[in-house]
Structures are given as C-alpha cells and as structure tokens.
Amino acid sequence: MYDISYKYMPHVSKKKLEEKYVRDLFWEIISVFERAGRRGELKQVLAQLLTSTEKVMLAKRLAVINMLVQNIPIHDIAESLSMSPSTIDIMSLKFETENYSYIVESGLNKMDIGDVIRMIQTVGGVMPPRSGGKGRWKFLDDTLRKERIASRIKKLKEKKKNYRSKN
C-alpha cells in the first residue's frame, strides 16, 4: 500500500519533545509572529516559514471556520474544499463549543476569505454558486465588473508606458 501522508501531509517527527519544550517553542513562535507583525513583515515570515502544504492546510482551516460562520452545510464545505466530511465535522464540533471564537472575532470579519471561498465554490466564478437563493448571481456580476475594470486599467497603463517610451 502506498503511503500518501508523507507526500501530501506535513511530516511530524515521531521523536517527541518534552511538553515544556513544546510550550516554550510555541510561545517563541508567537513572539516571532508578533514582532514581525509590528514591523509589517508577517507575510514574509510566514512565506519563508511555512511549506506550501502547510499554507494550504491553514488556509483550508480558516476557510472551514468562515464557512461554518456562514452556516454552510458540512457536506458542502467538504466538497468545496476537497476535505473529508469527518474532518469538517470535528471542526464543526470545535466551532460549536467556541474553540474558534478568537479567530472569528479577530480575523475572519476583516479578511476577504469569503471572496476566495465563493471563487472556490463557483470554479473561479464560472459556475453559479451551489446555494444562496435570490441574489446569488450578484457577486458574479460584481466579480466580472471588477475584472473588466482591472483589465481596462492594465491596458491603459500599458498604453501610457508605450506612449512614454516612444516619446
């Protein structure tokens, strides 16, 4: 049997550290994040520290929490994010017991993760959303309008650059 966990999951050493050292290391990580955040360098620190698999894993966890806040059914979350329904179920239980309250209060309301989730659910804005009822196309209209505007701005900048280089 082929073990995919090593290839696709973050590798955790089987050698265990004493709990005291794990706790100390965790608080040091938090300190590094706080210092980097105050200097405006958190994005760079995380980009250097996390592997692509860890970035996906954390992004999916935040997306699940955001979707739970929106009362999206577990099956829809699992399908949208290509995750196991049992994983979503476990996270849902933690969500219901307020284990994610700090994340919801401090981060998700300020993030554009909802837009990313809608893009995932609609295959990049090509398909209609799976749920939403009346007004479910509004975000698609807004998305297409924003893309057209961005495209026009890009073309205008290119024309301006070409004009300047000729003169």
Image (cartoon, grey):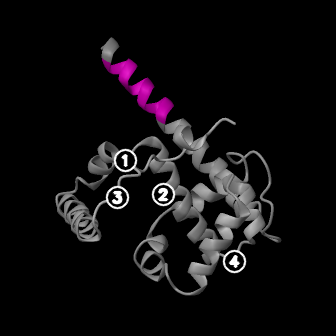
Name which of mark 4 and mark 3 comes first in the sequence: 3
Image x and y of residue 161, in percent: 36, 23
Q: Residues within 10 Å of mark 4 (few under 14, many from 20)?
A: few
Residue underneath mark 3: 16
User: To which quarter of the image does residue 103 belong?
Assistant: bottom left
Quadrant including the N terminus: top right
Answer whether labels 4 and 3 touch (C-beta < 8 Å): no
- What's under tag 1, amino acid-wise? Leu
Q: Secondary structure at mark 2?
A: helix
Image x and y of residue 72, in percent: 71, 72
Q: Nearer the viewer, residue 129 or 105?
A: 105
Give the distance between the C-alpha atoms of the residues marked 1 and 3, in whole angstroms: 21 Å
Image x and y of residue 116, in percent: 58, 55
Residue underneath mark 2: 58
User: To which quarter of the image does residue 73 belong?
Assistant: bottom right
Q: Nearer the viewer, residue 59 or 1?
A: 1
Give the distance between the C-alpha atoms of the residues marked 4 and 2, in whole angstroms: 20 Å
Residue 92 falls left or right of residue 106: right
- Looking at this view, name the residue that lies furthest to the top: 166
Q: Residues within 10 Å of mark 2 (few under 14, many from 20)?
A: few
- Stretch in magenta: 154-164
Q: Secondary structure at mark 4?
A: loop
Image x and y of residue 127, in percent: 79, 49
Tell me if I can see residue 140 in this picture.
no
Answer whether labels 4 and 1 touch (C-beta < 8 Å): no
- What's under tag 2, amino acid-wise? Leu
Give the distance between the C-alpha atoms of the residues marked 4 and 1, in whole angstroms: 30 Å
